[in-house]
Amino acid sequence: MSRDERDQGAASESDRDPLVYDQARWTADDEKYEPLLAEKHTREVEVESALPDHLTRDTLDLPDLSEPELARHYTRLSEMNYGVENGPFPLGSCTMKYNPKFTEDVAAHPKAGIHPDRSPESAQGTLELLYRLQDYLGRIGGMDAVTLQPPAGAAGEFAGILIARAYHEARGEDRTEVVVPDSAHGTNFASAAMAGYDVVELPGAADGRVDLDALEAAVGEETAALMLTNPNTLGLFERDIERIAEIVHDAGGLLYYDGANLNALLGRARPGDMGFDVMHYNVHKTFATPHGGGGPGAGPVGVREDLAEFLPEPRVRRTDGGYELFAPERSIGKVHGYQGNWLVLVKAYAYIARLGDEGLADASAKAVLNANYLAERIDYEIPFGPFHHEFVASADADAADVAKRMLDYGVHPPTTKWPEAVPEALMTEPTEIENRASLDQLAAAFDAVAAEDEEAIESAPERTAARRIDQVSAARNPRLSWQALDREE
Amino acid sequence: MSSHNSGSPFAPHTPEETAAMLAAVGAASEEDLFDIPDGLRFDGAFGIESRSEQATRAHVDATLGRNADLTEFLGRGHYDHYVPSLVDHLSQRSEFLTSYTQYQPEVAQGFLQALFEYQSMLVELTGLDVANCSMYDAATALGEAATLAARLRRISGETVLVPDLLHEGRRGVLENYVEGAGLAVESYPTDDANADVEALADRVEEDVAMVYAENPTVRGTIEERLPEIGDLAHENDALFVLGTDVLALALLREPASVGADVVVGEAASLGLGASYGMGLGLFACREAFLRQVPGRLVGVSEDATGRRAYTLTLQTREQHIRRERATSNICTNQAWVALRAAMHAATLGPQGLVDLANDCVTATADLAERVDAIVGMRAPVHDRHHFREFVAHTDQPAAAVASDLEREGFAVHVVGEHEIQLCTTETNAARRDALVEALEVVA
C-alpha cells in the first residue's frame, strides 16, 4: 500500500465507531478469575541446613509449580493487563509513550549488570554513560549540573528540596516553608513535608495559572522554594514565569521545576532559561523508559551552577584519564544506596541518543499537535486553554464512571477528578505516539460514552478482565495476602 | 520508516497527516501551538546528534563494553544470582512492562494479582502480616521504617540506633530521611561483626524510637542474638526494625519470630542481580501499623459479578490523596522489579529457595576455609556463621591485594587496611578455584 492510500484509509476511518474490545478473562469458577499461585500448588518443605537449628526456620511454605505451569500463569496474567502496546493510554500527567524495544536490548548488555562497588578503573563504560547522560540532561533542561541518583520523580523532588535546604543553611538562613500550587502533583506536598517543611498552598487564578497577587502574598522570608510545573497540570504555559521567578527570588527562595510536563517543551523552552534553579526529570515519562506497572522510574535532578556543590554523592566527572566518582564539597549526602535505577538510566540514555535534537523537538511538536487535535475532535467542554501536551475536559457525568465505560472501548481512560479546577475532570494526554486514526478512535470512545445513558456507564466496564470492583470494601476489610484469605476460610 | 529519518521515530505522523491535523485545529504550523513568550523560546540546538537504531545500539554497546571483563566476588548488599530465563521472557511481556500504576483495576488485574502474590510471598518469608509492593532499595526502605517509627504515637524517642558497621549508603540515605522527621541517627558498637548486645542494652533508653539490626550483616555474618535485641527495643517502647536479604529469609529464622516489628532490606537478589546498585526495597510489618505503612498495597475485593478481584487499597495513606500528610512521598516504585522477584521465587519453588540459600552458607564456608589455608591470609576474620560473604585478613595491604587481583581478572572489596571481603554465589562458582590460585600468588 502506498502512503497516499494509507492516508486515505486513515481519513475514511476517522468517523468510525469505537472499538469493541474484550480483555482476556481466565476463570474456571464463579468465585474468582485466574487462581493464585498458592491455590494451584504449594509445598511446605522442612528446612534443613548446616546452621544450628536456633538460627533457622523450621519450614517454608510457598508455591511449587513446574515451569510450563508458571509460563501459562504469567502469560494469563499479562493478558489481564493493559499497557501502552495494547492501545491508547492518554493518562494525563503520566506521559505514557511507546517504549522502544532496542533500549531493552541495550540495557541487557552483559556489562550493564556490573556490581556498584567495582573500582572506577574497571567501570569506565558505566561511568562514561552516566557522565554523558548528566551532560545531555543538563543541556535539555538548561541546567548546569545533574545528579542521576534519585530513583523516581518523587525521590527527585525530595533531593531537590534537600538541596534547597542545604543552600539556605549554607547562607545562614533557616527557612521553614515551601509554596505549592493547589493543582500540583501530590508528591510535591509530600516531598516538601518529608524534608521537614511546612507546605503553603497557593490558590490558582481564574485563568488556571499562578495568581501573581496570591503568590506575592504567599512568599516571604520563610519561603525556601516554590514548586511548579510548566506547562502546569492544566496543560497551560505559565506565561508570567519570569515574573514568578522574580517574586520568588526577591523573597530569597528558590524556584523548583517539576519535570512531569517536560515533554511539552523539548527543544522549545528550557526550565533553566525560565529562572528555575532546581528541577527533576522523569525519564519514564519524557524519555520513554517503561513505567513497569508502577516503576522502576528515575528522577535525575538538575541545578544551576551555584547549587552544584550540594548535589548527592557520588557524582561522576571527567578527568584526563577517563571518568571518576567524587563527592561535591557540601553534598547533601545520599538519596539512594548507590546510583539510583541504573538500568532505567541506560534506557533513557539510549532513547535520547537515538532521537537527538530533531527527534526530541519533534516529539514535543507532535505531542502538542495530538492533544490539540484530540481536544478539537471531542464533544466535551474544555474550560482552560490554550494548552500544550495535555488538556482537561469536563464530563457531564461522574468522571470516574466515564472512565470505567471508556475501558470497554479498548482505550485506557484519562486521569480523572484532577486537577480540581475543572469539574469532573478528564485530564488527557495522548502523547506523540498516536496517529490520526487512533486519535479519532479515542475521540469516538469519548463521544460514545458521553452519548450513553447513566445506567450504561454506572454498570461499566463489561469487557475487561474483571467487572467494576468495589474499592471501598477492599479498604474496609483489608486482605493483603493469600494467608489472610486462608484465615478467612 | 523512511519518512521518519528526521524527527521522532516514534511519532507516526506523515507530513500529509500533520498538515491535515494542523488544518483541523486551525493552526498554520506546529510552532503556533506553543504558547511560549518570545524571550523564552529556545532554538532546539542541544548539540545531540540523531542516530539510527543500529548506530545508537552500537554506540551504547561500545560504551558499556569499556567496563573491564572481571569475575566479581562482590556483595555487601548487592548480589548476583542466576536469573532463570522464564523471568526475562515473561516479565518483558509488554502488557506488564508498558503499563502504568493500577489506578483502573478492572483493566490491570494481571499486574495487581502478581503484586498480591509478591506481597504474600514476603508474608511467608518474614512471618509478618503485611508487606507492601516495593520500595526503591534497602536504604530508602530503612529510611521509611524510621519515619514510620517517628509517626507511631507510642514512640516518644528521637534517636534511631544502628550498628556501627552499617553500610555507608544505607546510613547516608537514613540520615536524609530522618532529618525532616526530627530524628537523629546514632551508632551502637558491634562485636566481631554482630551486635554488641551488652553495649546496646546500656544505650537503649527512652529517647530511642527505633533499634535497627541486620541479618545477615554487611560483613556476611549471621546475627545470633536477635531475640535479645528485639526484647531490648520493646522493653523501651522502641520499634525493632530488621534489615535482611530476601533469599536469606528462605533459611534464617522468620523475622517475626525474633520480635521484628518491621522488616526492610534488599529483594533485588531475586530477579535483578547487582545491576550497578539498582535495587528492590522490601518492606513488611505487623498488622498494627497497617495504616502507617508507606507505599502501595494490593488488596482483595470483589467485582460486580461477585468474583474475587484485586485493587490498590488504603490509598488514603498515599501522597496523591493525603498530600503533605501522606505516610511517604513514594509514587512510582519498583513494581516491575517486584514482579521479577516473585517470578524468580516461583521458579525456584520452596525447595529451590532453601537449597540456594543453603549453598550460600556451605559454599561460603568452603571458600573461607580454602582462603584460610593460603599463606599470608586468614579467613573468616569473624568467628561466626556466614551467608554468601566473609571478611579475610591479608598480611599485605588489602588495597594492593585487590589491585593485583583485578589484574588477574577478579573484583573484591577492600574493607580495611588488611581486610578484603569476598562474596560467592552460583554465578561465580566456576571461578572459585581460579580465585584461590590467584590469591595464593598475590597475597
Image (tube, rainbow, N blue to C red):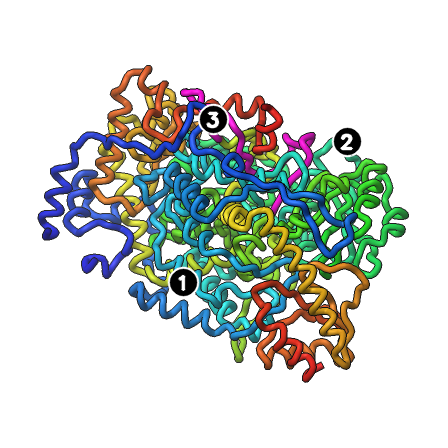
Q: Give x and y (percent) for residue B22.
A: 19, 43
With A428 as the anchor, is A6 left or right in this view?
A: left
What amino acid is found at the position of numbered circle 3 in the picture?
A: Arg
Highlighted range, magenta = B282-310
Q: Do tags 3 and 2 sit on the same chain?
A: yes
Magenta-drawn stretch contains B288: yes
With B224 as the anchor, is A310 left or right in this view?
A: left
Badge 3: chain ID: B
Mark sitting on residue A106 = 1
Point out the frontmost of discs 2 and 1.
Answer: 1
With A181 as the anchor, is B406 left or right in this view?
A: right
What amino acid is found at the position of numbered circle 2 in the picture?
A: Arg
As measured in the structure, the alpha-carbon distance from the residue carrying label 3 to the one carrying label 2 is 36 Å
Name the residue carrying label 2: B154
As measured in the structure, the alpha-carbon distance from the residue carrying label 1 to the one carrying label 3 is 39 Å
What amino acid is found at the position of numbered circle 1 in the picture?
A: Val
Q: Which residue is drawn at the image coordinates 62% and 54% (left, top)? A: B355
Mark 3 element type: strand
Q: Viewer-proximal residue, B402 or B157?
A: B402
Looking at the image, do the residues carrying marks 3 and 2 touch, with CB atoms under 8 Å apart?
no
Q: Which residue is drawn at the image coordinates 40% and 67% (left, top)? A: B60
